Amino acid sequence: MKVYSKGVLPSSEIYFHTPSETARNLFFYPLCVGHYWCSGEYRVDRSSYNSYLALFVEKGTGYVQVDGRRRTVGENSVFLLDCYQSHIYGSEEGWEIYWLHFDGTQAQAYFRTLCPISNCLVMTPPDPRSVRRSLVRIYNLFHDRGKVSESMVNKYTVSLLTDFFTGSPATADRGESVSEELLSYIAENLEQPLTLTDLARRASLSPYHFTRQFKKETGYTPHEYIIFARVNAAKYYLKTTSLPAKAITHKCGFSSEAAFCTTFKRVVGVTPLEYRRSSL
């Protein structure tokens, strides 16, 4: 199907899919898939699009902006994006991309294992051809206009996500300075102050070297990591409980209810109450 959107060139194609009940219950399933050639005017700016997005850059350069951070995505790079959250991506120079919007009963669990704090993972995989191959195979199932096999789409999507696990910083060796135990300590003690001095002491490093090493290995400063961890924990309580804001403030370690509301809106783009109402 041809595309008629600003910045998308005429040779581009997009295909939509309505998953069966079986696919919704058992598989990773596609919502839409495409192969785009884009000019420098291509830009997507959404508050939400209920799915996850895997996008591979065949040629050119683009960007993705989420959680208040803008990251460059170059040739042979790929990003995985939680489109349930607000997001922006596009290209100012033009690019060729393969992309897939997908979902599934295990999609959130996969995504949060890969991205426990951020809502986006950008990487250059060890074998870009493998990532490209999975996306192209899914695209070709639609492009060849035969009846789409949802089990085959699931198979190729699992292969695609496996490549993310293989190349993700979340699964790489973190060395001795920022251990999984320390990250678990942060997650399990969000209600505590979690000072830089205490965390550096636990890592047996000076605060200066701990901050440098932490950012190198996680992509965030300790302060940024803790803020996103607290906000994500607050999202969980807002979605799954009826706890009042005061209780969530305490459980997530914010200094006051006002600080909780201000930080949440700055990071998420809406107030906690607005998020709770839109999520239930």
Image: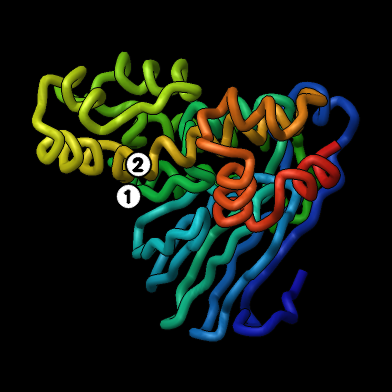
Q: Residue at x 59, y 42 (%)?
A: 260
* Residue under pointer 2: 223
248 relative position to 169: left or right: right
Task: Please identify the residue farthest to the right as the structure is shown.
Answer: 21
User: Which quadrant does the N terminus fall into?
Assistant: bottom right
Q: Where is residue 64 in the image (x, y as percent from the top left)?
A: 48, 62
The alpha-carbon separation of the residues under discs 2 and 1 comes to: 26 Å
131 relative position to 248: left or right: left
Q: Which residue is drawn at 39% across and 17% down?
A: 184
Vertical placement of residue 99 versus 165, above or below: below
Q: Of residues 57 and 251, which is closer to you in this image?
A: 251
The amino acid sitting under disc 1 is Thr
89 relative position to 184: left or right: right
Considering the numbered disc 1 on the image, is that residue within a helix, a strand or a loop?
Answer: loop
Crowding near the residue tagged with mark 2, few <14, some 14–19, many ≥20 C-alpha atoms within 10 Å: few
Q: Of residues 119 and 139, which is closer to you in this image?
A: 119
Q: Do we see residue 72 in this rendering?
A: yes
Which callout, 2 or 1, points at the residue further toward the start of the chain?
1
Q: Which residue is drawn at 47% across and 56% down?
A: 56
Q: Where is residue 54 in the image (x, y as percent from the top left)?
A: 55, 49
Crowding near the residue tagged with mark 1, few <14, some 14–19, many ≥20 C-alpha atoms within 10 Å: some
* Residue under pointer 1: 124
User: Which quadrant does the C terminus fall into?
Assistant: top right
Q: Of residues 60 and 138, which is closer to you in this image?
A: 60
Q: Position of residue 98 (x, y in %)?
A: 54, 59
Q: Of residues 226 and 56, which is closer to you in this image?
A: 226
Considering the numbered disc 2 on the image, is that residue within a helix, a strand or a loop?
Answer: helix
Q: In which quarter of the image is residue 24?
A: top right
The amino acid sitting under disc 2 is His
Vertical placement of residue 101 versus 180, above or below: below
